[in-house]
Image (cartoon, helix red, strand yellow):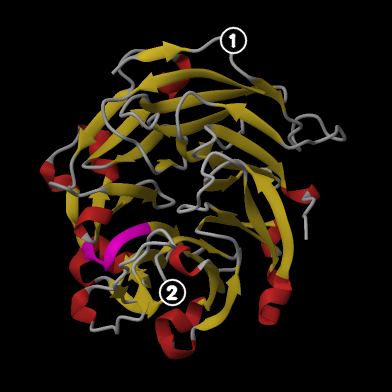
């Protein structure tokens, strides 16, 4: 692995709430050298990390490091990787970055990433052959790591504290939580008692009926029916001691549910159903205790929704419409803006859309509670959005 120092790249001016109060805030974009997937922001908002999932030709895998200097954000360097990174997460102490990379999970020293030092990698390990590791999350105490493995229909539970202390050994893998096919999202409840994940298709042993055409281009001639995907609710305490029996509930969530966000109070769960072109809204408590009545609303959005974000203290929901199987894959796309206070109105909760780059992939809300970062996968950009000043198009 080597670091590549990037100079002469696109630089953008941002006016973070903590840096330049009262100045004009404009939507901006940073050009990136490859397709961005995940994005995370440091607690002081001075550094951002973006996973680069290649250039479409099997090249340019890495972690992009961006810096914010008094409101000016610039791409500083790309740390090259020999594997394909997707979901990333920062530990809460800011010292470690974890990246899901297919059959590999990488753990980095963030200080070394920032400073461009050699060998920033702390450890690497595999969840198993063909694991398809795609998403990661850590507990608030930074002791436990959860990795969603698309290829083996499971979430791997890892003792991250042990790895940071002595390096990786097989005993750091505590076990696997069974899910349906292609688990992706992993979102903790505010009290961290529950971990919510998604799986794109129900497991055969659940016996769910096949009611939805398999995901694919709209003009595909043969699209066999498959079951709905699910929201899977995991008991976090049990996952640490008995991962195989940590699932509390599985609830149908439309076609190919992929990403999941939760309200600040933890009472609502929002899920993008990519193959249903919809946002599914659930009562969090009923997901666990009364699954038949858990769904509150299904809200039609754009084509192939993927990322979802709760903003403005829970009053706004942003849904990125990937147009995954659209014909114009190099053009612009949209994010649907939803008024969370009007969920019961269904379609009436939709305020309109904002413009994004091609294939919006991942949202993150900065610690200031106002600045939103969005990776645009096919446009190869990091978009900056002011959540306080969304100008929607009806």
Question: Which residue is located at x 36 percent, y 57 percent?
Answer: 184
Q: Which residues are magenta?
A: 177-184
- The residue pinned by badge 1 equals 8
Quadrant of the image containing the N terminus: top left
Which quadrant is the C terminus positioned in? bottom right
Q: Position of residue 363 (x, y in %)?
A: 56, 47
**Image position of 237 with respect to 174: above or below:** below
Q: Residues within 10 Å of mark 1 (few under 14, many from 20)?
A: few
Asked which quadrant contains residue 63, the reply is: top left
* Viewer can see residue 123: yes
According to the picture, the residue beneath numbered tag 2 turns out to be 254
**Image point 33% across, 25% down: which residue?**
59
> Do the numbered discs 1 and 2 sit on residues whose CB atoms are within 8 Å?
no
- Direction from residue 98 to residue 83 in the image, left or right: left
Residue at image x 76%, y 32%?
15
Q: Is residue 362 left or right of residue 182?
A: right
Say whether residue 342 is visible: no
**Whole-percent x, y for residue 32 in the image:** 52, 26
Tag 2, which secondary structure?
loop
Q: The residue tagged with tag 1: helix, strand or loop?
A: loop
Front residue (pair 361, 108): 361
């Amino acid at each position: 692995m080597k670091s590549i120092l990037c100079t002469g790249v696109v630089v953008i001016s941002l006016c973070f709430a903590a840096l330049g109060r009262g100045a004009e805030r404009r939507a901006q974009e940073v050009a990136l050298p490859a397709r961005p997937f995940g994005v995370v922001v440091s607690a002081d908002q001075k550094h951002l990390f973006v996973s680069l999932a290649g250039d479409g030709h099997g090249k340019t895998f890495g972690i992009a490091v961006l810096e914010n200097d008094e409101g000016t954000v610039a791409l500083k360097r790309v740390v090259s990787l020999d594997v394909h990174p997707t979901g990333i997460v920062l530990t809460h102490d800011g010292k470690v970055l974890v990246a899901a990379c297919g059959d590999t999970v990488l753990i980095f020293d963030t200080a070394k990433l920032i400073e461009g030092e050699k060998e920033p990698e702390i450890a690497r390990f595999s969840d198993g052959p063909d694991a398809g590791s795609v998403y990661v999350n850590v507990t608030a105490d930074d002791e436990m790591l959860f990795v969603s493995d698309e290829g083996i229909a499971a979430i791997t539970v890892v003792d991250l504290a042990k790895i940071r202390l002595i390096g990786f050994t097989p005993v750091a893998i505590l076990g696997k939580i069974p899910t349906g096919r292609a688990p992706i999202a992993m979102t903790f409840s505010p009290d961290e008692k529950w971990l919510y994940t998604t799986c794109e298709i129900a497991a055969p042993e659940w016996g769910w009926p096949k009611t939805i055409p398999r995901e694919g281009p709209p003009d595909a001639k043969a699209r066999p029916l498959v079951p709905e995907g699910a929201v899977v609710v995991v008991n976090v305490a049990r996952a640490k001691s008995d991962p195989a029996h940590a699932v509390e509930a599985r609830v149908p969530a439309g076609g190919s549910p992929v990403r999941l966000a939760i309200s600040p109070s933890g009472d609502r769960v929002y899920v993008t159903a990519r193959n249903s072109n919809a946002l599914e809204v659930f009562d969090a408590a009923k997901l666990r205790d009364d699954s038949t009545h858990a769904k509150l609303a299904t809200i039609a959005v754009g084509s192939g929704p993927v990322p979802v974000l709760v903003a403005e203290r829970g009053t706004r929901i942003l849904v990125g419409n990937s147009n995954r199987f659209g014909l114009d894959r190099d053009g612009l796309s949209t994010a649907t803006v939803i008024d969370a206070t009007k969920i019961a109105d269904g379609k009436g909760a939709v305020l309109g859309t904002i413009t994004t780059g091609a294939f919006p992939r991942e949202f993150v809300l900065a610690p200031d509670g106002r600045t939103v970062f969005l990776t645009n996968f096919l446009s190869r950009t990091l978009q900056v959005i002011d959540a306080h000043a969304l100008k929607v198009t009806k």
